[in-house]
Image (tube, grey):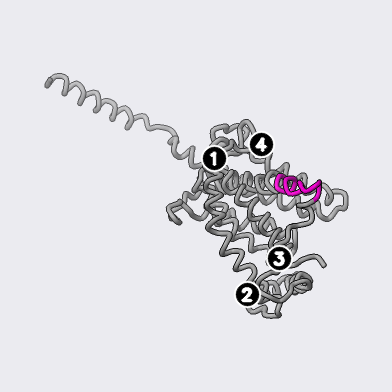
Amino acid sequence: MRVTGLAVAAAGLEKTRSLWNHPLPVSTQSAAETEIASRARKAIAATLAVYLLFGLFGLHPWLRAVRGLLLVAAFYFLPMWMLRDQPRVQARYEVGPDSPIPEWRWRGLKVAGIACLVIFPPFVLGFWWFYSQVCNGDLSVLAPVTYLEGLTPWAGGLETYLAKLCRTHDGGLWPEHIRVPATWTAYYGLGWLYELAIGLFAVAMAEEVFHRGYLMSALEDRWPPKHRIFGVPFGLAAVISSLMFAGGHLLAMAQVGRLATFFPALVFAWLWRRSGSLWAPALFHTAANALMDVLLSTTFPVR
């Protein structure tokens, strides 16, 4: 036993001497950190490039007609292309490698459904209360937003938009009837299926694949979350990706109020990490957009 112990100790000493005389090259950890930082920079650059091209395409009549389709294609396929040599990363981000549509998970539906039950009721009440104030001339609730807008070239745009919107508001808190958008009753009453399909696959899922699956995940590798919100790791990456998401919406409509999409983006980010599936934020995103369509049709009926 003693001889064996001495032999092991001697071998360990020899190994230590060998490592000391022949130091290892750059550590694997350093190489991985460099790759992570590079991936985050490329994700930010890709996002800015997509937004810039989308804005520029709006300046040309022909390109303006197809820029929406090109944007959806970029959201789905650009992440796969950017990570084409990293199939494991693609799978972890749910942006490939076999399909731009994430693999279906029932947990995504479950988490999205619970979120709808918790968030939608107070949101609906808040929506009706907000427009009952605004449409009766009380814009004090919007003072911070209108002040910021006054510092931009779009000063007065929000007030003009609200004045136009409120023309059909009845002035009360509660609407008389629940109305659905006219497009929902088209195609012999099946238009709502078409609208939901477009809302899910051409809007919500495309945006979630790009902004949460690709951008947020790449930034989260670079800046791992240091805090938890309701048990879910949440940090700088979610905030930055949500800010860029809101900035992208500003390009579609030059109105400071569009930056409010920052807040639902935080919810989408939380759902992504809570469920581990992009289907959760995509389904919630779709339901939220559909709810907004119903609220607008109900609160501001077409006369």
Which range is magenta?
186-197
- Secondary element under disc 2, as helix, strand or loop, is helix
Q: Residue drawn 55% across and 50% down?
A: 113
Q: Is residue 38 visible?
A: no
Which mark lies nearer to you, 1 or 2?
1
Q: In this view, does 177 lie above or below 201?
A: below
Q: Distance between the residues labelled 1 and 2?
A: 41 Å
Choose between 162 and 37: the one closer to the eye: 162
- The residue where tag 4 is placed is 81
Label drawn at residue 177 = 3
Choose between 17 and 290: the one closer to the eye: 290
Mark 1 / mark 3, whichever is N-terminal: 1
Mark 3 / mark 4, whichever is N-terminal: 4
Give the x, y percent position of residue 134: 68, 75
Q: Is residue 77 above or below residue 266?
A: above
**Mark 3 belongs to which amino acid?**
His
**Mark 1 belongs to which amino acid?**
Trp
Q: Quadrant of the C terminus?
A: bottom right
Mark 3 / mark 2, whichever is N-terminal: 2
**Mark 4 belongs to which amino acid?**
Trp
Label drawn at residue 106 = 1
